Amino acid sequence: MTHRNIPCVLMRAGTSRGPFFLREWLPDNDAERDQALIGAIGASDPLQLDGLGGGSTLNSKVAIVSPSQKPGCDLDYLFAQVGVGHQSVDTRPNCGNMLAGVAPFAIEQGLIEAQEGTTTVRIHNVNTGATIESTVCTPGRKVTYEGDARIDGVAGTAAPILLNFLDAWGAVTGKVFPTGNRIDVVDGLEITCIDAAMPLMILRAKDMGVTGRERPAELDANRPLLERIEKLRLEMGRRMGLGDVTNSVIPKPVLVSEGDQADSIVSRYFTPHKCHMSHAVTGAIGVVTAFAMPGTVASGITRIAGRHPLSVVHPQGQIDLDVELTGEGVNLNVVRAALVRTARKIMQGELHLPQYVFPSPSSEKIEAQKLADHYPQHEVKIIVPTSAGGGNDTMARIITRKIGPLLGNVVSVDNRTGANGSVAAEYVAASQPDGHTLMFGYIATHGINPVMQSLRYNPEQDFAPVGMVGYSPTLLIVNAALPVRNFQDFMDLMRTTDKPLNYASAGEGTIPHLAAEMLRRTLSVEGSSLTAGEHHAGAAPAINALVRGQAQWMFPSLFSALPYLKSGKVKALAIATPNRLTEWPDIPTLSEWGLDDFDLTQWYALFAPSGTSPEIVDKINQTLNEVLNDPEVRARMAQDGAQVKPGTPQQLSRHVQTEIQRWRKVIASTGLSTHSQVETAEA
């Protein structure tokens, strides 16, 4: 039997177990990647005899690790739950137990340089968009798994791994309480749906006719209970905005009951069709959040702001968490949760994948490859959703001049403006999926618009991602004549001004608009007409209005603002990125002034209509990456304030998913919304 051989590290992480892979070890194509994971675990068989699985969801888990695509993070962690007895891979949930193995795995694979004593790594969970800090013991700058830490559900002791969840609240749905209520009533039952590290559906055990302290086997044998829970889960999944969750493992059902002490709660966590033998870490964060906050079915005693040691009691012991609360009364919120896990490397070697998990090429696939070999057959048009002369248009024309000769046919730019890029997006989505009509998409068309507007296109379903083009940071600029020396002066002026201090926007729903409104809310001046915005049909006219004094400040991309910065017509006060720019080291970040949520890096990418064959998409992607690696193109982009970012279609697909989740969370937290459409907007 023919095998495919790939590197693999098998680890026990928390109370879970599974293979860890670097992303580069697996096939680039997501479909082939999933087939590889099915083969690795042996998912086809309930006993999983032909793979690494253990016949349970607890050891049918996979961690995929790579350098982070998210600014300010070190690693990307994609979790995959592989089926038991059926060929399925679900990347919608997260797993906090497997998360415990990510940092030590990455350090040992050379992705992270170990520090003396301990090493702290910032991890971006690709599934949910959440950020977690993981601190690992590294004496002598090497990972150690030996130590005295003990966690319930695991024999023996090991080195402690501290997991600090920083922004897990509302990470998947954009809201801590996705239905808009802290308690929903369905069939006479009170239910709390919460999105905190993991979307959960929480019920009181007594309301379901059980004590909540039963062993997992006893609950699994209660078929009427499981059927009732599943019926409720399907309904609440819909209400939470997750759609049809029949084939998904989220939301996870939880039965809670009163703990033995005021600081503990008893939980039975389902995965979702069987009761967990202990408890998921992400589930524990969701349960403890509902426990700490008032008005839920799990609420405990009234608590005040500050740090609280709380515990989630499960069938094999308990998970202790250090929880930080802010606010008071009904506005009490959990903003941080930290806990200790352990991990152990079981083995490292080469995994042999059976050929039967990779279907043989079909006649259709062979024919598609022939078409790709002869692509393009006529002129290729790249539809740019902004006006000629703007930042997006300039960037598109830089790459177009190089792509045409490489593809062997004419490649032209076609500007179709309107509705923040929606006009262009609708046009491309309805075009023939043959690779001859492409879209120069960007953060508005495939990140912000889906959250802000009712669209006639779906940014994920109606497009085939081709590849990322590049990034450009967002910065705060002001009219050169404005009497401020730095961002502190600007904040003081915003709060005390008795004269118009208005911002210029590239249009409603664009980064310049959203960033300005976020800042007004942060400075508590959103009600002032003196600091309101003026919307323009794109970044170029907006900056021109700023230069002429019709507006006083703006949040454009560096790509759009650079010519005006060089000429001295505007001055930069701060940049909305996690770190200062190498080319502009004197511009401080907004986080240096205490504004940590202003990560507003803008991005640009190439898309084809959905249904375009993977073979043609791959050919365009390879050509695009060749152009982006051209020293002349890289230098031109850098000169104009942008950084190229070659990548795969799969990486772009995951990036779009993450961006939509991130902006859903931003819009939900700020209350921003778009009530009208304006003509076009590049940022």
Image (cartoon, helix red, strand yellow):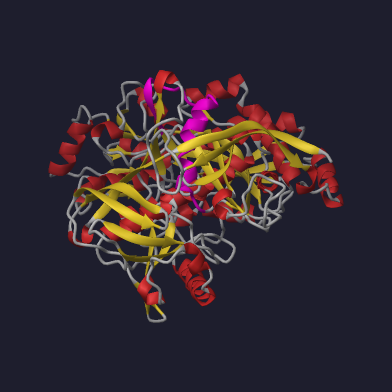
The residue range painted magenta reads 93-121
Residue nearest the observer in this picture, 651 or 225: 225
| Residue at (74% x, 42% y) in the render | 616
Give the quadrant of the N terminus.
top right
Q: What percent of the width, then of the height, locates residue 43?
A: 67, 52
Q: In this view, does 596 lie above or below 571?
A: below
Magenta stretch encompasses residue 104:
yes
> Relative to the observer, which residue lies in front, 535 or 582?
582
Up-down relation of residue 200 to residue 26 (above or below): below
Tell me if residue 371 can be seen.
Answer: yes
Question: Is residue 331 or residue 417 the one in the foreground?
Answer: 331
* Residue 477 drawn in magenta: no
Which residue is depicted at the point 36% across and 65% down? 256
Residue drawn where x is 36% and y is 32% of the image: 578
Residue 327: x and y, percent? 19, 53
Count the labels in the image.
Answer: 0
Decide which of 272, 430 is in the foreground and name it: 272
Relative to 225, 337 lies left or right: left
